[in-house]
Image (tube, coloured by chain):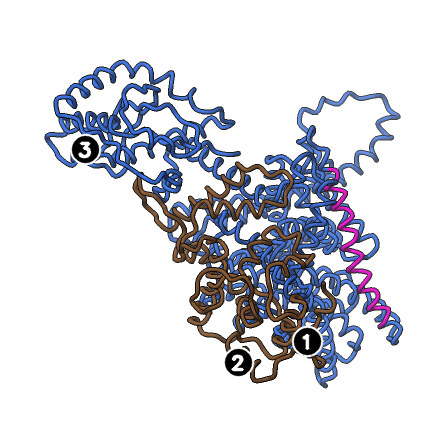
């Protein structure tokens, strides 16, 4: 790590490290990447993300980018979206992908699980009403299939419907014929993905070495 | 045998006794056959010697032989079939006895049977068939490996590839050298009478005994159902260490003749290892691609599709063996390479055939291997040396434990999901040795040392299979190791698996480093863009994975419905949630029960009662033909019933008069007919979602006789009332929802 002009001093890092759980090296690498993406400005905007060429072929690109600007992911119980984020918010969003350390209690593991699932829930729940409605879920499936050439709207819809039916069956069990299942609440979402082991799957290996010069 | 005859239930003892008796009969037949063969040969000789004499003299007419005995003719296939039949009868017998099969793993029982059979044959004085290495490596091993490789869980395997490779390569090397070295040290001890075993022979022995055996691991781990991670770690290691074993074995065998090892030889050994493993994988991949390409054109000859899979894989194995490359790795690579494309191309029946044939062959092979192992133990010449054998067993355990702990310490620095102490214990304890070690030992040149080695190998195999195999199940339960979770085939989990893949790839892009997910994503895109176009026929080449998963699930559900429908049972609907519950509704939901006067209600009831008579005749014409055309006839019937069930539930909600409310609808015959004039319902409620409609009206025709009667005497009256109520409910019902037809 060479001397960089816009590198904050150690005390600021200490604060960030405590908040997010990253090590100083990792924060340094991520800060470098932040500067690279924002062209050395103070804040990142959506068009900065659009500049990343590798991200262009990702089917859920727009949802990923939105997740960075979603106040719900900043761990400050905020709501709504912002138009630009600073390094701290960037780091907080990234911290959702940190792998859990080896020696943690079951409670801590459960907490981490909930956090990660909350992140994905927020990605699905675009209108911020606390439930994933059928329309929103259909949108998710359509986005996933958006890269295939032979996309049939009906197939995407029926997959989403089948999925929703499954959630309703698992969560509600018995429903009267005229009852309406409003949408997937967070509790139902937790129940649905109870066996998904998200705490071991939703992880990125954050390097301590600086490889940002290798990637665009 | 007395043990087998003492199970608690009478019927079981009878069946077991019968089986044992039949087995004895089979034995006697074998023995008679063997001795008859000898007799036959002798008789043959006599005939030929007499023949010239009779020829010279006048032709004396012999009476026409009505019944003759010529066993020699069919001897070989007869004996092979007999052995296989015996093995399978034994296997059958174990599963009938309930208590034994839960405690003792099948492999132990089979070895035990082999010991018995070997003992009997030896007691009779016959020559027992031994586990010939050629037979083992060319015929018995490939089906098991192909079965394992074809159904390998790819995702778990590739995610843990690094760990598996480290265990397989470094772990096996460590085992081989540690055991070899320590055994040499043991051999130098005075008084052990082992002074003539030199270092290279010890290293050769170490290389034979060090490898974890896939057959034994499969046999034991199949029954304990531990979680996927541990299963794939131990099993993957047992598959991939074949390359190391092959190289070390040939290396030391060559050198033990030569006598010395130089540095050049060691370097060549490393090069050889790379060639053997990578070459094996390459050969397998080529054959796999060939197989996938061939399957693209088999749409007109579906019957031979499974054969292509089997033959290409077997050819891959044999071709690798020609060059002394690792046959196992070649077979695995072939299966892995072929599978996604072949499965997209072949018919469902071919897929089922492949699955069952592979399972069948591997099951037979496994059974035969273990029985032969038992027989060979009794048959072979043994040279028992307490020091050698005991130290071998101890050293195997020690080196395994040390190796696993040491390697895990290093590996955990690179893993995201670390291996806990429990995991390490299971991995160490699951390092079973098996028939491969025995066959490799058998291939050694005949000498005093060979018998010594074979005895030790057999003892280690017995120890690991019996002691470790039997105790691993209680230990797994004791340590509360995570078990394999049931794969429910949830569409939500599949959606989220894909979602997560893309999400993590995206985050890696943003983070700025090319990690695991990035390369996987690139590979997938390459696969989709180029490879699939070449290897998958027709339009399925562009089908995204989510859609094929969904289609497979629908197919499975349809199959399930067919099966339950043919058993005349309603499908087990776990919950009462149906499509109507999740469809979005209009803003104002009004209950469509019109308020009508009592007299009007009476009139309507009378009309309906009259209609009921008429519509009874119309039932037949509407029962099936109005539903959409389905490939499975029973499926439509069951779906019909399912619709009825839902209809009933909805109707029961609109009770205008309180009455016996039944939890499960008992009506058997309900049909739908389009009689719009019966209804007075709000138009707003009819626009509920795009679904095709069954006919609108509902009429009840007959009640099921099994309805639980809650009141005794007024039952008949209650029935009648109920019928009327149901009819009136039809009135107030706003109309059945347009049900969605199933997608294929």
Q: Which of marks 3 and 2 is in front?
A: 2
* Contact? badges 3 and 2 (CB < 8 Å): no
- Name the residue: 34% across, 20% down: B673
Q: What residue is disc 2 on?
A: A15
Which mark sits nearer the N-terminus, 3 or 1? 1
Observer-nearest of B450 and A137 = A137
- Left or right, B648 with respect to B548, comes to left
- Label 1, secondary structure: give it: helix
Say which colour chain B has: blue
Is residue B615 placed above or below A116 in the rendered structure?
above
Q: Distance between the residues labelled 3 and 1?
A: 88 Å
What's drawn in magenta, residue-wise?
B267-294
Using the image, tell me which numbered label, if any, was put on residue B388.
1
Coordinates of residue B419 in the picture (x, y in percent): 57, 70
Q: What residue is disc 3 on?
A: B656
Is residue B518 placed above or below B614 in the rendered structure?
below
């Amino acid at each position: 790590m060479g001397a960089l002009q816009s590198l904050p001093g150690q005390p600021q890092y200490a604060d960030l490290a405590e908040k997010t759980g990253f090590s100083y090296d990792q924060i340094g690498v991520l800060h470098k990447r932040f500067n690279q993406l924002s062209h050395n400005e103070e804040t990142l905007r959506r068009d900065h993300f659009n500049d990343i060429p590798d991200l262009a072929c990702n089917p859920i690109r727009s949802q990923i980018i939105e997740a960075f600007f979603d106040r719900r992911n900043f761990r400050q119980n905020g709501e709504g979206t912002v138009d630009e984020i600073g390094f701290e918010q960037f780091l907080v969003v990234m911290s959702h992908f940190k792998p859990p350390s080896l020696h943690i209690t079951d409670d801590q593991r459960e907490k981490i699980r909930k956090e990660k699932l909350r992140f994905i829930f927020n990605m699905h729940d675009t209108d911020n009403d606390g439930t994933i409605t059928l329309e929103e879920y259909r949108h998710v499936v359509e986005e996933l299939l958006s890269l295939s050439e032979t996309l049939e709207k009906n197939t995407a819809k029926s997959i989403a419907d089948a999925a929703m039916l499954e959630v309703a069956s698992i969560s509600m069990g018995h429903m009267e014929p005229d009852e309406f299942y409003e949408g997937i609440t967070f509790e139902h979402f937790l129940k649905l993905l109870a066996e998904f082991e998200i705490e071991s799957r939703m992880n990125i290996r954050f390097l301590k070495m600086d490889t940002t010069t290798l990637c665009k | 045998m007395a043990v087998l005859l003492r199970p608690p239930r009478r019927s079981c003892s009878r069946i077991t006794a019968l089986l044992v008796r039949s087995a004895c009969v089979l034995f006697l037949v074998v023995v008679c056959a063997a001795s008859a063969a000898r007799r036959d040969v002798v008789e043959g000789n006599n005939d030929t010697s007499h023949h010239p004499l009779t020829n010279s003299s006048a032709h004396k007419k012999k009476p026409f032989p009505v019944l003759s005995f010529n066993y020699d003719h069919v001897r070989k296939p007869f004996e092979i079939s007999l052995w296989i039949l015996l093995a399978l009868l034994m296997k059958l017998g174990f599963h009938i006895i309930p208590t034994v099969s839960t405690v003792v793993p099948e492999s132990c029982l089979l070895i035990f049977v082999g010991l018995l059979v070997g003992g009997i044959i030896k007691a009779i004085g016959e020559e027992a068939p031994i586990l010939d290495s050629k037979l083992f490596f060319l015929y018995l091993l490939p089906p098991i490996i192909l079965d394992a490789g074809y159904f390998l869980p790819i995702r778990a395997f590739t995610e843990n590839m690094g760990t598996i490779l480290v265990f397989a390569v470094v772990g096996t090397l460590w085992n081989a050298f540690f055991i070899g070295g320590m055994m040499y040290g043991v051999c130098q001890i005075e008084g052990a009478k082992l002074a003539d075993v030199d270092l290279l022979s010890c290293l050769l022995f170490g290389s034979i005994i060090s490898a974890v055996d896939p057959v034994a691991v499969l046999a034991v781990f199949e029954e304990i159902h531990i979680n996927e991670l541990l299963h794939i770690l131990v099993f993957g290691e047992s598959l991939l260490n074949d390359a190391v074993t092959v190289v070390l074995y040939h290396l030391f065998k060559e050198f033990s003749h030569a006598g010395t090892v130089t540095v050049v030889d060691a370097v060549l050994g490393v090069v050889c290892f790379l060639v053997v493993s990578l070459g094996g994988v390459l050969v397998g991949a080529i054959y796999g691609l060939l197989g996938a390409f061939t399957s693209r054109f088999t749409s007109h000859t579906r019957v031979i599709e499974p054969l292509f899979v089997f033959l290409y894989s077997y050819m891959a194995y044999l071709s690798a063996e020609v060059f002394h490359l690792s046959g196992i790795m070649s077979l695995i690579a072939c299966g892995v390479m072929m599978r996604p494309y072949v499965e997209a191309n072949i018919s469902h029946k071919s897929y089922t055939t492949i699955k069952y044939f592979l399972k069948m062959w591997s099951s037979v092979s496994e059974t035969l291997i273990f029985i032969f192992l038992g027989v060979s133990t009794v048959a072979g010449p043994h040279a028992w040396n307490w020091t050698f054998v005991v130290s071998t067993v101890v050293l195997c355990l020690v080196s395994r434990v040390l190796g696993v702990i040491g390697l895990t310490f290093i590996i955990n620095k690179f893993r995201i999901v670390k291996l806990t102490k429990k995991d390490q214990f299971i991995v160490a304890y699951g390092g079973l040795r098996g028939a491969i070690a025995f066959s490799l030992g058998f291939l050694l040149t005949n000498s005093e040392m060979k018998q010594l080695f074979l005895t030790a190998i057999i003892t280690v195999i017995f120890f690991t299979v019996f002691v470790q195999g039997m105790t691993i199940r209680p230990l797994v339960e004791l340590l509360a190791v995570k078990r394999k979770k049931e794969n429910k085939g949830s569409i939500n989990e599949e959606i989220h698996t894909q979602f997560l893949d893309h999400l993590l790839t995206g985050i890696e892009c943003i983070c700025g480093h090319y990690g695991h997910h990035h390369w996987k994503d690139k590979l997938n895109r390459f696969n989709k863009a180029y490879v699939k176009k070449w290897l998958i026929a027709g339009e399925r080449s562009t089908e995204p994975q989510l859609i094929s998963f969904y289609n497979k699930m629908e197919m499975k559900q349809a199959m399930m419905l067919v099966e339950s429908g043919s058993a005349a049972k309603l499908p087990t609907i776990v919950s009462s949630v149906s499509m109507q519950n999740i469809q979005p509704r209009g803003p104002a939901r009004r209950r469509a029960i019109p308020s009508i006067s009592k007299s009007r209600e009476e009139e309507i009831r009378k009309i309906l009662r009259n209609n009921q008579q008429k519509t009874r005749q119309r039932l037949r014409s509407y029962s099936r033909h109005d539903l959409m055309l389905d490939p499975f006839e029973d499926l439509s019937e069951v779906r019909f019933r399912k619709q009825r069930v839902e209809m009933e539930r909805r109707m029961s909600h609109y009770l205008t008069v309180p009455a016996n409310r039944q939890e499960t609808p008992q009506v058997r015959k309900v049909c739908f007919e389009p009689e719009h004039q019966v209804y007075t319902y709000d138009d707003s409620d009819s626009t509920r979602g795009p679904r095709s409609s069954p006919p609108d009206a509902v009429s009840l025709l007959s009640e099921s006789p099994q309805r639980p009667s809650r009141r005794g005497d007024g039952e008949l009256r209650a029935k009648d009332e109920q019928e009327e109520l149901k009819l009136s409910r039809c009135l107030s019902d706003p109309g059945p929802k347009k049900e969605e037809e199933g997608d294929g």
